Image (spheres, rainbow, N blue to C red):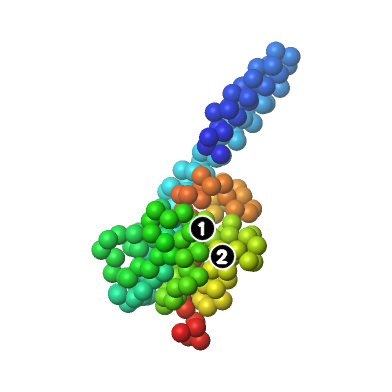
Amino acid sequence: TFPFLPFLILASACVINRVAAKAKSWSLILTVIALAIQAAEGLAIAKAFAAVNTREQASEWLLSHVSPGTEIGIIRSYYWTAPILRTHQSPFKVIKGGDDRSRLDEALAGWLNRDLPPYFVLSDIEYRDFLKSPASSPQRKALDRIFDNVEQVASFAYRPNFFGIPCWWRNPPFDLEYIAPDQRIFRRRESSR
């Protein structure tokens, strides 16, 4: 939504200007509505930055529940990855589907032929769109393989709200998701060894 904001503001100003020329009371109402929408999104973004960071929550959970040296799988290291798994001094052995320069689809497909580690950390941003892929795609096959062999043990999510009212009933806009992406921690099932 951020890239479109300047254009939305200019378009709103043009509409308000035309309406103002015809009816003074309508221009005030439209101005208040436009400002309220901008204020609501601004507050939602400010609250998201002030909230507990989901990536840090996932890092803390891993540090308190997983032994140092344990292998933990991720698709690839990027901003959505828990910080403890991105650092070069991670106490865990981080296994990736691809290197840090791999495209997301390539890194996900990289899990088709690898052994699954005891733990796996995923963000919804990484895999949500691939769940819509055809079942025959390498990315979908890799996801199905992962999800068939793991169980979720922890989940950390932040849902933006405005005075306690959810702003988005499905997935929030990407600009809010980037601030606090959902983190899911999975453990390999015993039967999958």
Residue at position x 54%, y 50% in the image: 160
Q: Residues within 10 Å of mark 1 (few under 14, many from 20)?
A: some
Q: Amino acid at mark 1?
A: Asp
- What kind of element bears circle 1? helix
What residue would you read off at disc 1?
A: 105
Indicate the position of residue 99 as horizontal and vertical percent values: 38, 59
Quarter occupied by the N terminus: top right
* Alpha-carbon span between mark 2 and mark 1: 9 Å
Residue 107 position (above or below residue 23): below
Q: Quadrant of residue 66?
A: bottom left
User: Which residue is most to the right?
Assistant: 22
Marks 2/1 in contact by CB < 8 Å: the verdict is yes
Query: Residue at coordinates 44% horizontally, 76% vertically from top-left?
Result: 115
Can residue 102 be seen here? yes
Query: Which residue is label 2 attached to?
Result: 138
Q: Is 61 positioned to the left or the right of 45 in the image?
A: left
* Residue at the spot 41% in from the left edge and 75% down from the top edge: 117
Q: What's the residue type where badge 2 is placed?
A: Pro
